[in-house]
Image (tube, helix red, strand yellow):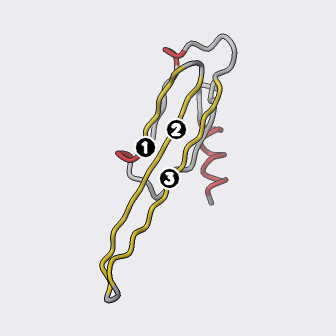
Amino acid sequence: SIQRRLNRMLNSSHDHKLLALMDVEGFDPKEVTVTVKDGKVKVSAEHEEEHTTAGGKEYNYRNITREISLPPRVSEDEVTYSL
């Protein structure tokens, strides 16, 4: 389950300065954008699919956006992320 994977990641992290975990399953890494600006980390992901069916074209669109404020005394230059 997702919760078990998150728990494993937290338990295996040697650096206990983890700010947040986000589930972006179903998004290609190229569809995920992370920016750090004005004391906030913003994560956005956008996915669009087009399918041709007997009745015409169908579109599937998903997006998520989340902003997280950095804790006090954390420099924007210190922020790292991985997918």
Q: CA distance from mark 3 to mark 2?
A: 11 Å
What is the three-letter code of the residue carrying label 2? Val
**Are the two marked residues, 1 and 2, in contact with CB atoms closer than 8 angstroms?**
yes
**Residue 62 drawn at (x, y percent):** 49, 58
- Identify residue for label 3: 63
Question: Where is the N terminus found, in terms of image quarters?
Answer: bottom right
Above or below for 70 versus 12: above
Dot 2 crowding, Cα within 10 Å, few <14, some 14–19, many 20+: some
Above or below for 26 versus 51: above
Report helix, strand or loop for mark 2. strand
Above or below for 29 versus 58: above
Report helix, strand or loop for mark 1. strand
Mark toward the start of the polypeptide (3 vs 2): 2
Going by the picture, which residue comes out furthest to the bottom? 54
- Identify residue for label 1: 32
What is the three-letter code of the residue carrying label 1? Val
Mark toward the start of the polypeptide (1 vs 3): 1
How many marks overall?
A: 3
What is the three-letter code of the residue carrying label 3? Asn
Q: Quadrant of residue 70?
A: top right
Question: In front: mark 3 or mark 2?
Answer: 3
**Are the two marked residues, 1 and 3, in contact with CB atoms closer than 8 angstroms?**
no
55 to the left or right of 25: left
